[in-house]
Amino acid sequence: MTTLIALEIEKVLRRRLNQVVLAVSLSLLILVYVLLWMASDVLAQAGAAGGEGVQELRSALYLEETIPFAVLMLYLFGFVAGVVVVGANVGAEYTWNTMRTLTAAEPRRGRVLLAKLIALWVTILAGMLVAMAVMLATSAVITISAGEFDLSFVDAAYLGDSAGSFGKVLVATSPYLHLAFLFGVIGKSPTAGIALALGVAFLEGIIGGLMVLAGGWLEEIPRFMLDHNGDALAVSGEGPLSGLLGQEGAFAGVFERPDVAHSVTVLLAWAAFFLALTFWSFRRQDLEYQGG
């Protein structure tokens, strides 16, 4: 099993698409910080109305208060990048016909799929940690340039809250990653894994909002859907921008967000269900040759 996992990690690290996705994601995260800092600076110099909001924007980019904002950015960018990586890496095994070779070398199919899942999670976790480090480094540069650099706020509580916020992002993204894993296996192609998972992520929020507006028993269904609970975790931290950024979306004002315990339970249950369905489908799957 260790050999299988090491092989899968090597494959993930060497694929050019994964390297490009990581580079693009990190570049976009840095760009968001820089553009927001430049915009807030322009607004502050112009004496724009709503100065309190401008100050909140600037303070959210400083190192002391940037964790909630960084977590939200990691959720918005991380789940998309993760879905692309998972869907592409799983689906490509079918289009390249390497899945047939792997299952021939290791007859216990479940071990092949488990090794791939572990390898993908290890690399995605590493990528998220790198992304968080890059955002904190960018925030540190902004903080230093503004003459506000001070590490006196770093204590056990700060580190604990930061680790907890990062854990919430992992929980919030896990169902979407497992959904891409499921669609990649069932659809036997990268397109199925990526497009269907992103399609669900896009449409679910709209459908959930319409259910709330419809009222009655339909109003309770979004409390058990991915989008509603994932968003609740992403903006559950306290910080200057957590409330503001949590009001995005066409139906944001309609929802009453669930508590953290409810969201974690629902999201982990969905993640486990998608994973169980993936292994069940894979064990019964015909691995016929796919011509180019």
Image (cartoon, rainbow, N blue to C red):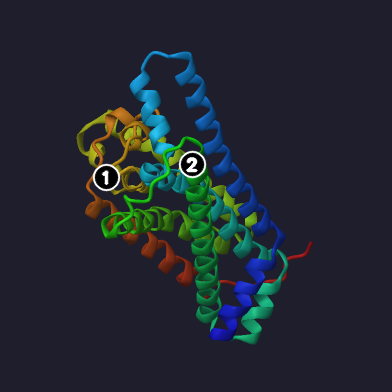
Q: Do callouts 1 and 2 mark residues in contact (Cβ within 8 Å)? A: no
Instruction: Specify whether 217 is left or right of 35.
Output: left
Residue beneath disc 2? 144
Residue 125 lies, in percent from the top left, at 49, 63
Identify the image quadrant of residue 261.
Answer: bottom left
Q: Residue at x 43, y 54 (%)?
A: 173
Q: Residue at x 47, y 35 (%)?
A: 146
Q: Nearer the viewer, residue 63 or 107?
A: 63
**Disc 2 on helix, strand or loop?**
helix
261 is higher (above) or lower (below) than 279: above
User: Looking at the picture, does residue 169 appear above or below residue 280?
Assistant: above
Identify which residue is drawn at 41% across, 68% down.
Answer: 276
- Between 41 and 278, the one nearer to me in the picture: 41
Calculate the distance from the C-alpha at mark 1 to the C-alpha at mark 2: 42 Å
Residue receiving disc 1: 223
Task: Please rate how many residues cluster around mark 2, counting C-alpha atoms within 10 Å: few if below 14, some from 14 to 19, many from 20.
Answer: some
Residue 200 visible, this angle? no
Question: Residue 113 at x, y = what percent?
Answer: 53, 74
The amino acid type found where label 1 is placed reads Arg
What's under tag 2, amino acid-wise? Ile
Q: Residue at horizontal 39%, vertical 61%? A: 271
Q: Where's the C terminus, which quadrant?
A: bottom right
Residue 217 appears left or right of 120: left
The 10 Å Cα crowd at callout 1, few under 14, some 14 to 19, many 20 or more, is: some
Counting from the top left corner in percent of width and height, residue 22 is at: 61, 54
* In-image side of 33 versus 150 (left or right): right
